[in-house]
Amino acid sequence: MRLVVKLLLCIVCLGVLNAETFTDDFFTIKNSAMQKKEFVERMLPLIKKANDGIIEERKIVEAFFETYRAEGNLNAIDNNTLEIIQNLAKKYNINSVDDVKAFKSKIAPVPISLALTQAAVETGWGKSRFFKEARNAFGQWTYSVTNGLVPTNREEGKTHKIRVFNSVQESVNSYMLNLNKHDAYSDFRTLRFLLGDEFDGLLASSKMLNYSQMREGYVKLLRQVMVSDKLIKYDY
């Protein structure tokens, strides 16, 4: 029963979105330093909220495996709890409900400095058209026919669009889920699993080669922004 309550709280955390924090007043700011400051202040609670939701899911998983180890088999797990774990396995692309390493490597928070830095880079500190019109903070693509904005300089023959979100919070949630389940970021998750609390944004940025066609250039840019704008401090 406690697992059910925790999951409901987690769903509220991830699914019920706050009123939009990036209101029209943000997009009227002309001073670059002020815009950066406002961008961080408005993005930070959204990133923390998304991470809090992941942490609640992590607690559910840890409680499940504690019971599983104590009982010795899945038959001892009640149906409601097992259904919750099955839903999390589906959400994170985990093949087996008894794969404790997969659960713990995939269901973990993303370094705050990495999320802040990528949002800053992908939106130009909130100046991009796609951030304003699509609430897309991380440049996520879609191939949906009906949902998406066509990039202005999209190459001929390409069909991708910039995904439209209902809010920036939804965009943050989607970004973190992408890092936590997509095969392209398995190295990111492996290093996070190995290092635990020592895993910070600078280390995480080294595993973002697949996030951009810029590859090594993108990693270098992330590190430059993270250091020069003192974003690494938010990991501590």
Image (cartoon, grey):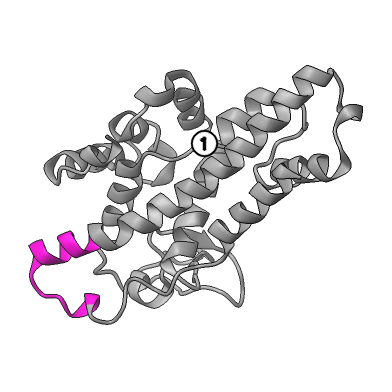
Q: Residues within 10 Å of mark 1 (few under 14, many from 20)?
A: many
Horizontal arrangement in the rendering, residue 150 relative to residue 60 (left or right): left
Horizontal arrangement in the rendering, residue 160 relative to residue 136 (left or right): right
Q: Give the prevailing secondary structure in the magenta stretch.
A: helix
Measured as percent of width and height from the top left, residue 225 is found at 19, 45
Element at badge 1? loop
Q: Is any part of residue 163 visible from this angle?
A: yes
User: Which residue is depicted at the point 59% across and 60% down?
Assistant: 12
What span is colored magenta in the figure?
A: 26-39
Measured as percent of width and height from the top left, residue 54 is found at 53, 44
Measured as percent of width and height from the top left, residue 14 is found at 55, 57
Which of the pair 45/4 is nearer the observer? Answer: 4
Q: Which residue is mark 1?
A: 108
- Is 28 inside the magenta-drawn segment? yes
Location of the N terminus by quadrant is top right
Amino acid found under the numbered disc labelled 1? Ala
User: Which residue is depicted at the point 68% across and 41% down?
Assistant: 93
Which of the pair 209/63 is nearer the observer? Answer: 63
Task: Answer with the quarter of the image where residue 88 lies.
Answer: top right
**Rendered position, 75 above or below 39:** above
Q: Is any part of residue 124 visible from this angle?
A: no
